[in-house]
Amino acid sequence: MHDRNQAGFVAGPGSAGFSRFTSLGNREGSVTTVHLGPTALHETAHHLSLFVEGLRDYSVVTLSPDGTIMSWNAGAAAIKGYEADEVVGRHFSLFYTPADIAAGKPALALQEAAAKGRFEVTGPRVRKDGGVFSANVVVTPIVAEDGRLLGFGKITRDVSDRVAAADRLTMNESRLQALVDTVLDTLVDGLIIIDRTGRVQVYNRACEKLFGYDSAEVVGNNVKMLMPPNIEREHDQYLINYQTTGVRKIIGISREVVGQRKDGSTFPMHLAVGETTHLGEPIYVGIIRDLSERNQVESQLRQSQKMEAVGQLTGGLAHDFNNILMLISVNVEALLDQEFPARTRERLEQIEKSASRAAELTQQLLAYSRRQALQPRLTDLNELVFATSKLLGRTLGEHIEIEAILADDLWITNVDRTQLETSLVNLSLNARDAMPRGGQLLIETRNVILDQDYVSQNPDVAAGAYAMLAVTDTGSGIPPDALEKVFEPFFTTKEVGRGTGLGLSMVYGFIKQSNGHIKVYSELNRGTSIKMYLPRADGTVDAQPVANAASLATGTERLLVVEDNADVRARVCEILRDLGYTVDEAADGVAGLAQCENAQPPYDLLLTDVVMPGPIGGKALADAVSSRWPDTPIVFMSGYTEDAITHQGRLDAGVRLLAKPFRRHELAQMIRQALDERGSSPGAP
């Protein structure tokens, strides 16, 4: 009878226990059997015994069916530290760790070897000195030709160096992967990797913020889920065309496209796509940058440039145009003091109204371009709403129901009260026009803190405390495509002839010039809410004098009028003389300063234009007079100041300005007030 083991030799009768040598080939099921004669068999067995005994890098042992060690070669002694007489007859679990013994791994190894014809594992083994090493172990059954299990052959190799190298490689790969993951997660820009079919393989944290999807929701799905429907079809075609023709339309090319978030909203993004291969397959790497903020900044820059252009144009025209309107207004006003037939008087009143309307349009353009000279003062918005609501009740009509919700302890704000009143009226008139069949108008005040989260979405405003004034209607609303244009000059949703398109642009310019913020919310057929935010200010609101246009303030003081426009100068001087004043006049700053130097005693008041030709303009003249005759009050008049007497569009404290064109009673009141305040406040700017 012959016994064949799985290692490639057969044990049987004879001095060496072998009757034939069987070689197992490399291919599964390929067996070559070599029959040997007695002499050759003896020599082969001897050679094989010497070969096994001489192996130093391999532990070759035989085990009984129950795992008892039957033989022990020199390699086993070298690797495990035991001599043959120390281990033969002992169970091979001697070399296992306590944890593996407790888990029953020695018995499992023999069971699997017997059942499957082979067992192989790499794991820890214990040497005689207690040291643990990494071992590659192969156990094969030794089976007799009649199928009886005679025992096991066990080959062990010390692979500690290989395992340590693999562990180092794994550790390095883990560190590299951790580094890559960290880089991907800390990238400001989004990074997406897709395969040739468009399935997402990598989706970093920046993409989660951009699109609103978690990584688990995207990876494995087609990248088209991040695109609007109209772009999905284009993407498929681009990818197919590139893979079939090699023509690049998106690969290797940066372009601006539109992405779609999880909530269905879209946003502009810059997309750069590159190509590489992984495991022989093409993959596409996309770098994504959100362009929303950049586009918003560019839009704001365009808006600023537009305002600058309008401002330059308006400023260039405003000075001369307002002088012309000034002449029309004061002359018509003088004519209306006389007796005329009713029809002639009606025409004069129409001229006066047209001149006022023209002056209003010029002022609105200056307001939009932030070129008007504001006169801010501490203002209680609740008191302003209460005062203005009386006018609104008469102006809007009975079909509009007005309601006011005013906050208690509302913060004070420093604002040009007149301009804010005009803004409130303009917004209310717009609301009325949006409710031709009637509706509700709500005017609301509230204290508001605009935090950094709000500022991040609205970069044109500074974080801080604001007093809010809101005007809300229940009208037709503003179409979505018109919302971003509502503040542009000459843009209007009203029918031709019903609006200039300057009302909202004037409000916008005024609020921005006041360091405030304005926001529009609107839904079609639901209504519109416009919220104005004005910075909180400290202080107490003073009572304001009430102008009396019916009686003109007069006086007998001596005044100097400096104005380069001869017609305007003559008319202003005429009005002042009619009011009882003694008036001298000069055509420019040089002549005005000379007359001041020659006046004895000094003039009681200087009334000067701001923008004049020559080396000495209105501001320079005022500075000279103020330094030499500090008790002389100064009043400026101008249709456009060119920032000569303003800082960031605001008049300095103590500066008095008559904006052209002005009415006779406004001139009389300003002059009288300046003269009366000589002892209580500085007259110079």
Image (cartoon, helix red, strand yellow):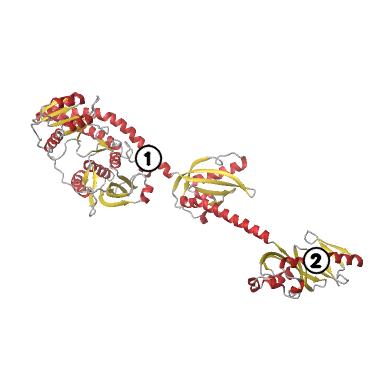
Dividing the picture into quarters, in which one does residue 488 lie? top left
Sequence-earlier tag: 1 or 2: 2
Marks 1,2: beta carbons within 8 A: no
Q: In the image, what residue occupies the spot 65% across and 57% down?
A: 165
Other residues around mark 2 within 10 Å, as few (<14) / some (14–19) / many (≥20)? some
- Eyeballing the image, is 467 above or below 615? below
| Side of 522 where 609 appears, left or right | left
Q: Nearer the viewer, residue 45 or 203?
A: 45
Tag in front: 1 or 2: 2
Q: Secondary structure at mark 1?
A: helix
Q: Secondary structure at mark 2?
A: helix
Q: Which mark is residue 300?
A: 1
- Eyeballing the image, is 205 above or below 351? below
Mark 1 vs mark 2, CA separation in Å: 88 Å
Dividing the picture into quarters, in which one does residue 135 lie? bottom right
| Side of 54 where 595 appears, left or right | left
Q: In the image, what residue occupies the spot 55% across and 55% down?
A: 178
Q: Nearer the viewer, residue 180 or 355?
A: 180
Whole-percent x and y of residue 97? 65, 70
Q: Which residue is labeled 2 in the image?
A: 53
Q: In the image, what residue occupies the spot 19% across and 30% down?
A: 608
| Side of 149 where 528 appears, left or right | left
Q: Give the residue type that dot 2 points to.
A: Glu
Q: In the image, what residue occupies the spot 33% across and 34% down?
A: 308
Whole-percent x and y of residue 127? 69, 68
| Side of 351 where 292 appears, left or right | right
Q: Can residue 513 be seen?
A: yes
Whole-percent x and y of residue 561? 16, 28
Q: Give the residue type that dot 1 points to.
A: Gln
